[in-house]
Amino acid sequence: MVLKPTATIDERLGVLNPACTRLRNGTLQLYPRMVAPGNISRIGSFGTEERPDGVLEVEPRGYVLQPAAPYELRTQPGGYGCEDPRITFVAALDTYVMSYVAFGPRGPEVAVAVSEDALRWQRLGLLRFGPSEAPFADKDAAFFPEPVVSPSGVEPLAFYHRPTLPVSVRGGESALSSLAALPENQREGISIGYVPLDAVKTNITALCTVTETHAVALPPATWGTIKVGAEHHRYGLRKAGSRSFTAWTSSPIPRARRCCATARG
């Protein structure tokens, strides 16, 4: 299955970086980033129906998020909006959790939204790391489906994320040579952040308050040496310059997993 841009202006520059999840009735739902001229991004919604012959029919259902919050809008050149969603059903909350990149006046930051049905979403705001309100450039966040035990011994919800260096924010693809010149331990890599579960059960907005974050020690490899980020909580790491990535979904209903991928031709 391939989703391609149409003549519709809202998606003319690309349909890419999709998330996916299973709705409570077991059907697969897709959430691609849809890019309009000016690099203005929205998060789309596509329902699916699997025919008896195995063919997956896809039906567009509009957008689940369009740029509206102050942290998703800006007047600077380079675009703005809601980018690159990852969606996890968190059974401990009986809630779908979406992490996405809010590209606004402070640059790319991770924002969170929640939903009971994965169709109608409530924004919670930007992730906050510690007491500081300073901008924190970040991408590639994806929540784990179950609580874990953090290094401090607390039972939190955890998420992967990729703290992003200023050179990446300013330079995009052209920044790769600058990143490659850095020592390996200073390049962009995966971190794991932690949000106390009890606080979230008391007030869902606490999902944005990160109390711990730690870099992940990755084994030596010949790929992903410039930067690497998590694409979803169970499988798949993206390497810079790769032609595709894989994002797997977990579901409250045991069903076969499916893959979402973006190709760069």
Image (cartoon, rainbow, N blue to C red):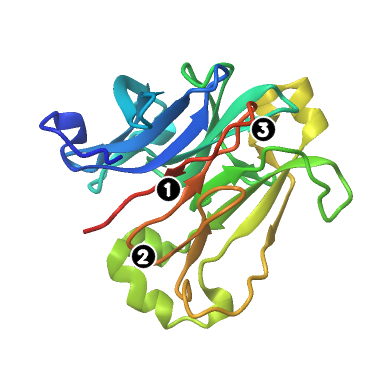
User: How far across and how far down the image is residue 14, in percent?
Assistant: 22, 43
Residue type at mark 2: give it: Ser
SS of the residue at dot 1? strand
Residue type at mark 1: give it: Pro
Category of crowding for the residue at label 3, using alpha-carbon neighbours closer than 10 angstroms: few (below 14), some (14–19), many (at least 20): many
User: How far across and how far down the image is residue 29, in percent?
Assistant: 44, 27
Image side of residue 143 versus residue 14, left or right: right
Residue at image point 34% right, 67% down? 241
Between 30 and 39, which is closer to the camera in this rendering?
30
Q: Which residue is mark 1?
A: 108
The image quadrant of residue 265 is: bottom left
Q: Which residue is mark 3?
A: 207
Category of crowding for the residue at label 1, using alpha-carbon neighbours closer than 10 angstroms: few (below 14), some (14–19), many (at least 20): many
Question: Counting residues from the N terminus, which is met first, the one under dot 2 or under dot 1?
Answer: 1
Residue at image point 67% right, 32% down? 207
User: How far across and how far down the image is residue 176, in percent?
Assistant: 35, 72
